[in-house]
Image (cartoon, rainbow, N blue to C red):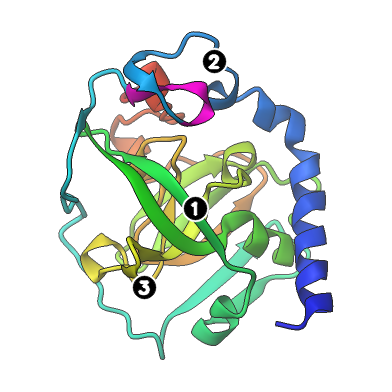
Amino acid sequence: MPEDKEGRIVDARMKLRQRFQQRMQKTPSAADARPQGSGPANRHGMPKLPVGQTVTRGWPVLDLGRMPDVPLSKWELVVDGAVEEPVRLAWKDFIALPQTKDVSDFHCVTTWSKLDVPWEGVQLSTVLALARPLPEATHVTTHGYDGYTTNLPLEEALKDDVLLVHTAEGQPLPVEHGGPVRVITPQLYAWKGAKWVRRIEVLTHDRLGFWELRGYSNTAHPWRDDRYS
């Protein structure tokens, strides 16, 4: 990607994040003085494990029973809704965006955590910045190719470690874990990151997703044992 184009994308992302900076700093994972958990301190000053979690060295597979296998030639990502300029990205467009490598933890509400996972992908804030959310935008709903949905307030969606990942542990993201691209939300329980993501819908209000409608927490903060509504 030419440096001037990448610079414009990064600048747009930073301006979008600045709109939500104060709200981001007040989220529990960033502001909790006494998080629930145990073990030596890990990222964000938190204990290594949220309360009720155990470490797994594997990676259990959980889904709705539908596992779409989307070839890269047909995969696309749409960003629309309350935005100034809807975006439609083919695989080549997505891979051409600024890429990010990060290491973070993956906390599943079913009580297991996978620690120190190396990821590679695109920051969710980057694709949102391309679409330019309207001033009144407050939330996003992510949609998967399997019909799954989940919701995030923009102050969570815009955090630097929230990624659209295509690579995990140095390998292309396996289809059973949401490949070719899924969302990860390291500061929230993992159901807040849709597998097989195909659409990011920007909203001016909150709208519950698949599990939120079925009794899971709408906020999903692991460090508060925030599992169910």
Q: Position of residue 141 (x, y in %)?
A: 51, 51
Residue carrying label 2: 32
- Left of 159 or right of it: where is 169? left
Callout 1 touching callout 2 (CB < 8 Å) = no
Q: Quadrant of residue 31?
A: top right
Q: Secondary structure at mark 1?
A: strand
Q: Position of residue 177 (x, y in %)?
A: 26, 61
Under mark 3, the amino acid is: Pro
Which residue is drawn at the image coordinates 80% and 42% (left, top)? 18
Q: Secondary structure at mark 2?
A: loop
Callout 3 touching callout 1 (CB < 8 Å) = no
Under mark 1, the amino acid is: Asp
Is residue 155 something that shows in the picture?
yes
Q: Position of residue 206 (x, y in %)?
A: 56, 38
Q: Quadrant of the N terminus?
A: bottom right
Mark 3 is surrounded, within 10 Å at the Cα level, by few (under 14), some (14 to 19) or many (20 or more) other residues, namely many
Residue carrying label 3: 180
Q: Which residues are magenta?
A: 43-49
Under mark 2, the amino acid is: Asp
Mark 1 is surrounded, within 10 Å at the Cα level, by few (under 14), some (14 to 19) or many (20 or more) other residues, namely some
